[in-house]
Image: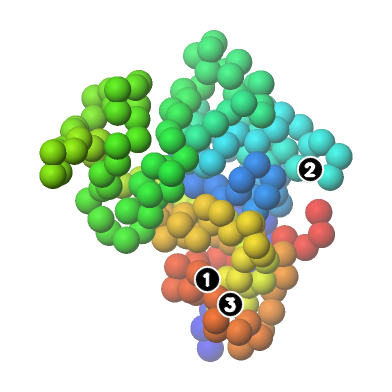
Amino acid sequence: MSKSKIITAEIAADLIREGDTLMIGGFLSCGAPHRLIDELCNKKVENLTVICNDSGFAEDIGNIKAGIGKLIVNKQISHLISTHIGTNKETGKQMNTGEAKVTLVPQGTLAEQIRAAGFGLGGILTPTGLKTEVEKDKQKIVVDRKTYLLEKPMRGDVALIKGAIVDRKGNICYSKTERNFNPLMAMACDRVIVEAAKIVEVGEIDPDNVVTSHIFVDYIVDGGKL
């Protein structure tokens, strides 16, 4: 009998070390692994590089969770690689004071850099960012007389992602737009921890609804009700 992948949020947080590069799924509060983020805040793991879509909110707003914003407020992130930070003033403050480094990446480019890592590609070519700050120190390649920027693959040590329904083997079904960056990140990190809104037995998920295969998932955490 194979070893169970199900662990507690506390144990999951213990697997993350100071200086790790994390990919954290979600678009603002949607599809973010809130229980894992909360536990990471409790453990106070510092000097993290975090790759994500955005920096969330500085605090919970009613039923809307702060998401990655809690890690920003706790000053656990030393380098944020993201597509926008406008919803969290604390991010801009730390960037301006030098407390944290912030690298802004066009959203589509970030998604494709993560995808390239997961698919084993050497990079992607995109015209997005030409003649802007984005092109600084990047190689330009001309294809059919059109110029592109070479954007290299982006990998992480650990992916923290969110699944709507996850079986005990680690097959994941996502809920609508909660999918966002989660499937891409599951393929681009050395270790993958999925927070499951619901855990079911193997065979209970229709194979047609499995988006992320169990072969990419190392650990499962029961997200339950927050």
Q: Disc 1 and disc 3: Cα gap in Å?
A: 6 Å
Residue 217 location (% of width, % of height): 50, 67
> What amino acid is labelled 2 in the image?
Ile
> What amino acid is labelled 1 in the image?
Val
Q: Which residue is mark 3?
A: 209
Q: Which residue is mark 1?
A: 211
Q: In the image, what residue occupies the spot 27% across and 59% down?
A: 120
The answer to whether residue 142 is left or right of residue 204 is left
Residue 78 location (% of width, % of height): 50, 27
Q: Which residue is mark 2?
A: 64
Q: In the image, what residue occupies the spot 72% across and 60% down?
A: 223
Q: In the image, what residue occupies the spot 65% across and 62% down?
A: 176
Q: Earlier in the sequence, mark 1 or mark 2?
A: 2
> What amino acid is labelled 3 in the image?
Asn
Q: Are marks 1 and 3 in contact (CB under 8 Å)?
A: yes
The answer to whether residue 55 is left or right of residue 188 is right
